Amino acid sequence: CKKDHKKPTPSGPKPFAAWDFSKDTKDQIGKMHLNLQGGAKIDKGTLMLDGHSAIARSKPLTKAINAKTLEAWVQLNNTNQRGGGVISLQTQNGKRFDAIVYGERDPGQWMAGSNGFVRTQGFNGPIDRDANKRPVHIAIVYQSDGTITGYRDGKPYGRPYKTGIQNFKAGGSEIIFGLRHGTGPGNGRMLSGKILKARLYDRALNADEVMASGSGNPNYISEKELLANLTQAQREKLTELNTSLAKLNEELRTLEEVGASAPDPWRDLAQAMFNLKEFIYL
């Protein structure tokens, strides 16, 4: 039988670029392969970063990116470090960037780093006391309207905020690991730790998609894929269910305000919607 030489598809929503360091330094999806510099190395399935000189830089971006999602599975060597970048999308001169950064403004907290803090406000999330003990999943979502949302282990981290959006041009932008921004090592910008996997999406993921990716759910089906495979009758049924669900959620909030408990039909409706989605793909 013939061997399947197709690139493996990561679980969950499809990224624009993806790196799995248990395999190699190549982009699993496209052409943004990495170049290891400053002593960066792959060891035991992780990208090892020493916090001094080790970084990894990608080939140039192959399309312009506006709205986006940055995502990484990372374990820190220590939680006392400040300002290191896990994954950064930057112009090749390092002057403009958006990055997942640890502890730059607020010790122990994850933040959306940016040039001159122009797109940076604190998420005010909890101090991360586990990131040096185990890998944590961090994602930052950048919507086209400037809303920025952080996630940790698939769940919202702190609160979202709204600033602006930075456009990154094809051919003049890159992904960099281990450095907040720049063209080479710099004090206060280096990350000490190891990265297991990382992904760049050319769109803003929603909360369910972040959860699916973070959990590695191989059965995830996007709403777009779902709708594309529905019959007209199924679309009409889904619209009816969504309308009913919205109405019931509003009634549920009213019940909760007066201290009442929710009856079983709410759970029944949610199960019906789930079953419809599963039935389509049997």
Image (spheres, rainbow, N blue to C red):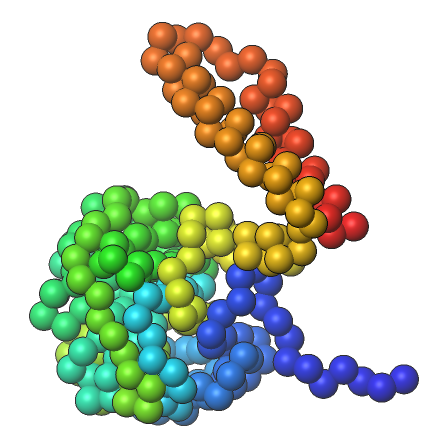
Nearest to the observer: residue 24 or residue 90: 90
Instruction: Depth check: give the residue in front, 160 or 224.
Output: 224
Image quarter of residue 77? bottom left
Give the quadrant of residue 267.
top right
User: Is 191 rendered above or below residue 76?
Assistant: below
The extreme front residue here reads 232
Q: Tell me which corner region of the image, top left, top right, bottom left or bottom right, holds residue 277.
A: top right
Q: Position of residue 201 (x, y in %)?
A: 42, 69
84 vs 229, left or right, is left
Residue that appears at 64% across and 37% down: 237
Residue 181 shows up from this direction? yes
Q: Residue lying furthest left in this view? A: 116
Q: Does residue 129 appear anywhere in the picture?
A: no
Q: Residue at x 32, y 53 (%)?
A: 150
- Horizontal arrangement in the rendering, residue 8 relative to residue 30 (left or right): right
How far across and down, in percent of the image, does residue 228 sit? 62, 57
Q: Quadrant of the N terminus?
A: bottom right
Q: Foreground: 8 or 205?
A: 205
Give the answer, above or below, for where 262 lies relative to 233: above
- For the point 18% across and 78% down, the residue is 96
Q: Where is residue 189 in the image (x, y as percent from the top left)?
A: 20, 75
Who is closer to the viewer here, 186 or 30? 30
164 displayed left or right of 48: left
Vertical arrangement, residue 186 with respect to residue 272, above or below: below
| Circle count | 0
Q: Residue at 49%, 22% (x, y): give it.
A: 248
x and y percent of residue 255 in the render? 41, 12
- Outermost right residue: 1
